[in-house]
């Protein structure tokens, strides 16, 4: 693939993010949007992930299907940097009867395809995962404090304070806090290049 200048890359990613967001707002699956727009599901996936530079004709078909003016798909405002996300502006979410708490560190309005979370896992908590949706998502975990045991790809791994690990979301099977105190971890999830 030829080198794309950063502004063009940003526009392509911005279009993809807008199409995906609008599709989800309308409650459409990729398959249904493909049917409505007469654009293949594979091409829509490439557009949404920012991996394809769509033609004007393709954008016109998509814009009709998601009921947005074509011009709105091509609006691109350069993000302002630096950007600060204050702790008090992000809400913590308790999950599964307060067994663990998740707080987003990167906010959803960013166009980057990375999610970053701070997670607090209570002592003795074990979680089993059945992951199909995030199969192409690279998971990066950094253990700030505590002790964790993870089952990834059928193998067990023990992590101690300061350890980190990378794996594909589809391979995570179990996660447990082995310690007697809360475990704090930073967890990022991003699209894999694979």
Image (cartoon, helix red, strand yellow):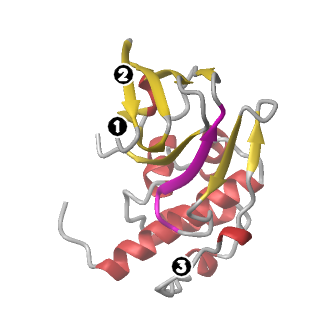
Q: Is residue 140 above or below residue 167?
A: below
- Give the residue displayed 40% in from the left and 40% down from the top: 161
Q: Is residue 25 above or below residue 74?
A: above
- Position of the C terminus, as image quadrant, is top left
The residue identified by callout 2 is 157
In this view, the residue farthest toward the top is: 154
Q: Pointer 1 and pointer 3: residues touching (CB < 8 Å)? A: no
Dot 2: what SS? strand
The residue identified by callout 1 is 165
Q: In this orientation, does residue 36 appear? A: no
- Position of the N terminus, as image quadrant, is bottom left
Q: Mark 2 Cα within 10 Å, few/some/many (few <14, many 20+)? A: few
In this view, the residue farthest toward the front is: 180
Please state the extent of the stretch shown in magenta in the rendering. 111-122
The residue identified by callout 3 is 74
Q: Which mark is residue 24?
A: none
Choose mark 1 or mark 3, whichever is in front: 1
């Amino acid at each position: 693939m030829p080198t794309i200048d950063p502004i063009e890359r940003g526009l392509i990613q911005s279009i993809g993010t807008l199409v995906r967001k609008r599709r989800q707002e309308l409650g459409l699956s990729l398959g249904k949007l493909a049917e409505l727009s007469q654009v293949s599901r594979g091409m829509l996936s490439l557009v949404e992930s920012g991996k394809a530079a769509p033609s004007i004709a393709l954008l016109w078909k998509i814009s009709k299907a998601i009921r947005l003016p074509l011009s709105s798909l091509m609006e691109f405002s350069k993000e302002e940097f630096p950007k600060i996300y204050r702790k008090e502006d992000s809400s913590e979410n308790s999950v599964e009867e307060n067994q663990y708490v998740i707080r987003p560190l990167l906010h959803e309005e960013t166009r980057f395809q990375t999610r970053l979370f701070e997670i607090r896992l209570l002592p003795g908590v074990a979680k089993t995962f059945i992951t199909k949706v995030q199969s192409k998502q690279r998971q990066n975990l950094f253990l700030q404090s505590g002790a964790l045991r993870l089952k990834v790809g059928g193998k067990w791994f023990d992590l101690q304070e300061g350890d980190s690990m990378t794996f594909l979301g589809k391979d995570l099977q179990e996660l447990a806090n082995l310690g007697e105190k809360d475990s704090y971890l930073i967890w990022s999830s991003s699209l894999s290049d694979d």
